[in-house]
Image: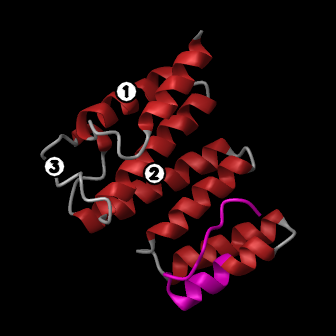
Amino acid sequence: MQGIVATDDLPPRVAGYLTAAAASGDWRDAESLLWRAQIADPACLHVYYTLYKFYFNHKRLGDAERAACLALDAAARQAHIPADWRSQNKDSCDWSNVNAPQHFYLFSLKALAFIRLRQQRADDAELILAKLREIDPQDTVGASVIEAYAIGAAA
């Protein structure tokens, strides 16, 4: 299964579920294991990343979108910021801290923009990308790559 990365820094139970999901030859079993990991530790941001990558790779874009939104909610709770990306601004928090949950929030917002592009929702994706330009002007999460893709897709 694609989308699973090293589990060394994860809680053992979560790491076990993710390892089992990666080894599973059945996507339904892998999906179930990923959700078990999320239930085991709803604060573990890596699980949400794995979920939206899993769904994206299986071309289940609606489920990928849902997982990305759950990721935004979880990261926002940990960063003590509103979950709604539209309410964010450059002063909502210290966006430059790449080891903080708000960086994961930015990364998941970029993923949501890409998912929306793949869903043929270019206007929605552009709104998200504009917000990322505003709150991450240094492009620490690489949203410019998604912007370039969007421009190419529109041409």
Residue at the image position 45 percent from the left and 74 percent from the top: 44
Q: Earlier in the sequence, mark 1 or mark 2?
A: 2
Mark 3: which secondary structure?
Answer: loop
Q: Amino acid at mark 2?
A: Cys
The residue lying at 17 percent from left, 41 percent from top is 90
Q: Based on the displayed image, in which of its 4 quarters is residue 2 positioned?
A: bottom right
Mark 1 is surrounded, within 10 Å at the Cα level, by few (under 14), some (14 to 19) or many (20 or more) other residues, namely: few
Residue 147 placement (x, y as % from top left): 47, 26
Q: Which amino acid type corresponds to the residue marked 3 in the rendered image?
A: Ser
- CB contact under 8 Å: marks 1 and 2: no
The one nearer the camera, 135 or 119, is 135
Residue appearing at x 52%, y 17% in the figure: 151
Q: CA distance from mark 1 to mark 2?
A: 15 Å
Magenta stretch in the rendered image:
1-18
Q: Residues within 10 Å of mark 3 (few under 14, many from 20)?
A: some
View extreme (right): residue? 25
Which quarter of the picture shows residue 21?
bottom right
Discs 1/2, front: 1
Q: Which residue is mark 2?
A: 69
Q: Which residue is mark 3?
A: 92
Label 2: element kind: helix
Residue holding disc 1: 127
The three-letter code of the residue at mark 1 reads Leu
Q: Is residue 138 above or below residue 26?
A: above
| Nearest to viewer (mark 3 / mark 2) | 3
Going from N to C along the chain, the mark reached first, 3 or 2, is: 2
Would residue 3 be counted in the magenta stretch?
yes
- Eyeballing the image, is 50 above or below 96? below
Residue at left offset 30%, top offset 46%: 84
